[in-house]
Structure formats: C-alpha cells, structure tokens
Image (tube, rainbow, N blue to C red):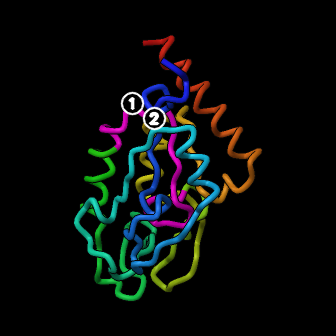
Amino acid sequence: MPPDTPTERPLIAISQCILGDRVRYDGQVNTYTDLLSFIHSHFQTIAVCPEVEIGLSVPRPPVQLSSDGKQIKITGRDDPSIDITEPMEQFCQQRSLQLNSIQGYIFKSKSPSCGVTDVPLFNPQGEVISMGAGLFAQTMLQRYPNLPITDEQTLDTQQQRELFLQSVQNYREYSISHD
C-alpha cells in the first residue's frame, strides 16, 4: 500500500476547535489553513473537545482553572458558581483510556482543558498564581509520558511541524516494534 494512503498515516488526536468545528465557548471558529493542510497531508485524526463531550453547549460561559490552595477546579470565569470539575475529571479518566492507540496529540493552547503549558491558574481573588496544563492535557501527559504532545502555537513554522511529524513517526515505530 502506498505510504500516502490514510491507513498508513499515523493516528493523532487533535482539539476539535483547531479543525475548524464550531465548538469553542464563544461559538467562534478560528482558521488554521496552513496547519490543517499539514495535518491532513500527514495524519489520520481523532477530534476531541472535552467541554462539548461532557455536554456543554456552544456558546457557553467561559471557564478557567482555579484553586483555593487545596484542589484545582474548572469553574466559570465570570460566574464562579459554575463548577464542571467533576464531569471533566470523569471525562479525563475515561477518554484518555480510549486514546491509547494514538501516536501524537495536538492540543489547543490556553484552553483550561487542553492547554499544554500556558493555562493560567487563578486564586479566589482572581489573581494568576501559576501557569500550567489544562485538566485533560495534564491527564494525557501523565498517562502517556512519551507521547508526542504539542499545541497549535508550537506548530507555527514548517520546521516545527516537521519536528512534530518526526516525533510522531518515531513514537509509532517504537510502539509497533514493542507490541
């Protein structure tokens, strides 16, 4: 089978909003034309949107990561009485297990569920106390520590995209040889 057929392409998961689907909290669609061309040329994809998959609407109130010093929660940005921590934690555990056959993941930056490194964590006074990963990205990083994981901002240049592709191919080859 020729290497450019879909069944020979590595399988990656990707934040559904990056694919241009209307799943963002504000109902807007961001366009990533060059990145999508690269993705569709090299990968098979599984779209994931934690917020929509736990049943939240589009549009919906924005959420953020917050902490009282004891636990990290995902709560409403403008309405702190909104708390989706429990359904999101359940989703994180179940969905991450279902993604055991992927060879890479492209997350949406700055998302309280999907950001990899750039998600602000707020204290009860609304001050940023640290930056880190969103709840679902954190779960994936812990469950699959060797999986190539990035976000759309990190794939801004062709060189960065080629490095991610090579990482995915290496991970795939290693996985196949150790099955």
135 w.r.t. 171: above or below: below
Q: Earlier in the sequence, mark 1 or mark 2?
A: 2
Q: Nearer the viewer, residue 13 or 94?
A: 13
Question: Could you tell me if the residues under marks 1 and 2 are in contact, i.e. CB atoms within 8 Å?
Answer: yes
- Label the magenta part by its dominant secondary structure: loop
1 w.r.t. 93: above or below: above
Q: Position of residue 125 (x, y in %)?
A: 49, 86
**At label 2, which amino acid type do we have?**
Leu
Q: Is residue 74 left or right of residue 30?
A: left
Disc on res. 101? 1
Disc on res. 135? none
Range of magenta residues = 96-115
Q: Which residue is mark 2?
A: 11
Residue shown at 57%/41% (left/top)? 41
Residue shown at 30%/38% (left/top)? 98
Q: Is residue 143 left or right of residue 85?
A: right
- Mark in the foreground, 1 or 2: 2
64 w.r.t. 14: above or below: below
